[in-house]
Image: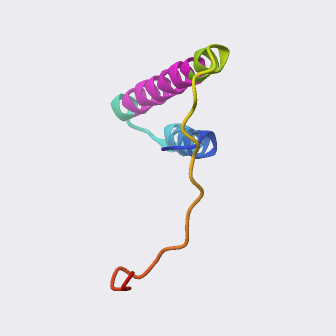
Amino acid sequence: MLSNKHIHEEIKKIDEVIDVEKNETAKANLKATSIVIKLLHNIRTNMVTIMRHFNINLVESKKEEEKTDSTEVK
C-alpha cells in the first residue's frame, strides 16, 4: 500500500516534470494524471474517515520488515 508520504512525493515529481516539459500535449497529460492521483487519494482519505466513524477495523500498514534469505530453512 502506498503511504501518504509516497503519494505526495510522486505528485511532487510529476509537478516538477510539468514545470520543465515543453510539449504542451505531454504537459496536459501529466497534469490530468496528477489530478486523477489527487482525486483517488481524496477518495481513499474519505473512505478511511467513514470507516473510522463506523468503528470498522483498518488494515495496519506494515513497516518494511527485514528481508530474509529465501534459502533459509525454517
The number of discs equals 0
**In front of the other: 30 or 52:** 52
By secondary structure, the bulk of the magenta-drawn segment is best described as: helix
Residue at point 38%, 36% (across, down): 23
**In front of the other: 16 or 38:** 38
Residue 43 part of the magenta segment? yes
Q: Is residue 17 above or below residue 50?
A: below
Q: Position of residue 69 (x, y in %)?
A: 41, 82
**In front of the other: 12 or 22:** 12
Residue 71 part of the magenta segment? no
Is 5 left or right of 66, judged from the image as shown? right
Is 37 left or right of 52, judged from the image as shown? left
Q: Is residue 8 above or below residue 33?
A: below
Residue at point 41%, 29% (across, down): 33
Quadrant into which the C terminus falls: bottom left
**In front of the other: 38 or 17:** 38
Residue at point 43%, 39% (across, down): 22
Quarter of the image for residue 59 reads: top right
Q: Is residue 18 above or below residue 36?
A: below
Q: Position of residue 7 (x, y in %)?
A: 55, 40
Q: Position of residue 53 (x, y in %)?
A: 66, 14
Magenta residues, start to end: 27-47
**Residue farthest toward the bottom in the current orientation of the protein:** 72
